[in-house]
Image: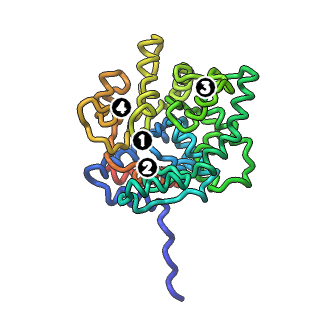
Amino acid sequence: MPPTDPLPPALPVCEFIVKNYHNFNARSLRAALVAYWSHIQAGGKMFWALAGAMSSAQLGITLAPAIRSGLIHGLSVTGANLEESLFRLMAHHSYKDFPDYRYLTKADDTQILEAGMRRVTDTSIPEEEAFRAVEKIMVPMWKTASQQGSRRFWHEYFYDLLGQIDPHHYEGNPEHCWLLAAAQANLPLVVPGYEDSTFGNIFAAYVKTGEVNPAIARSGIEYMASFYDQYQHLSAEGGLGFFQIGGGIAGDFPICVVPSIKHDLGQPVKPWAYFCQISDSTTSYGSYSGATPNEKITWDKLTQQTPMFVIESDATIVAPLMLSALLECCQYPEAAAALFASYQS
């Protein structure tokens, strides 16, 4: 009889990282992975900040199962990432990719505009199938809230909207929609600066015409006031870590909760228990996105004991790799412990 093929390794991604990633940004990724899993194993929780166009880049393929597996316990996202996760679910087949985007001319992009597509690097969101299709469901919700005088957080409208969509109308794989996974888990979300998004603009237009009351959307200040309690709850046992993709308000807003509780409310608070940022922004004068983690110590956001990691690389490559490795750890925790112990020895 021919020899049987050996069983595939239980942790192929983890083993690849441990075997190959020894220096530079690769070392940072490996160390961040091991510390992330150690934090989770010790009973800690993890909060993610999502900037950039990660939803259009289909990060949900790994982010959604990570939410369902208990690897992510809260999110701060831009309004664009929030809505674009929904767009991918609703209109995936109507997206168009532009692999040669680097060589497009202004005339090419004008043609893309006239075709009703809104380009995001090498892919594009279809206006009619995404923006306008969702608008037909969302606007009546806003109008009803205006009539009833009810007020909700921005993401809660999207959570409710998902409950109104017949799954038969999904074009994208629901297993790959992180917003759907978050809604099903009723995950704590913070959406700072949601006005800077397509639906923020649509909302403003309906406010301008008097069809919608602006008060139905709770403010960013109210998001922070609510996040005070959410942070205390999430950090109560093993502490809460912070995993950040990109820079800007998605990251800066929630990380400020610790010094604000401590100094503005005058209440005891646990510091962030872990920090990792994936960024392609280089350190420069006044650049928050490129600021080193040590700078956050001076703002009382982190301490010198906080495990800190910066991975200066492309988040569309690094984040799925990190999440895939963590999902393996969830499936085979004992094998992961042994593998990481061998790396550390």
Mark 4 or mark 2: name the one nearer the start of the chain: 4
Q: What residue is shown at x 36% (from left), y 56% (from top)? A: 18
Query: Could you tell me if residue 258 is visible in this image?
Result: yes
**Model colouring:** rainbow
Comparing marks 2 and 3, which lies closer to the viewer?
3
According to the picture, the residue beneath numbered tag 2 turns out to be 319
Residues at marks 4 and 3, CA–CA distance in whole angstroms = 46 Å
Which residue is at the front of the view, 167 or 15? 167
Which residue is at the front of the view, 94 or 153? 94
According to the picture, the residue beneath numbered tag 4 turns out to be 306
* Mark 4 nearby-residue class (10 Å; few <14, some 14–19, many ≥20): some
According to the picture, the residue beneath numbered tag 3 turns out to be 208
Residues at marks 1 and 3, CA–CA distance in whole angstroms = 34 Å
Residues at marks 4 and 2, CA–CA distance in whole angstroms = 21 Å
Q: Position of residue 69 (x, y in %)?
A: 58, 47
* Mark 2 nearby-residue class (10 Å; few <14, some 14–19, many ≥20): many
Mark 2 or mark 3: name the one nearer the start of the chain: 3
Residues at marks 2 and 3, CA–CA distance in whole angstroms = 39 Å
Comparing marks 1 and 3, which lies closer to the viewer?
3
Q: Position of residue 21 (x, y in %)?
A: 31, 55
Image quarter (top left, top right, bottom left or bottom right) of the N terminus: bottom right
Q: Secondary structure at mark 2?
A: helix
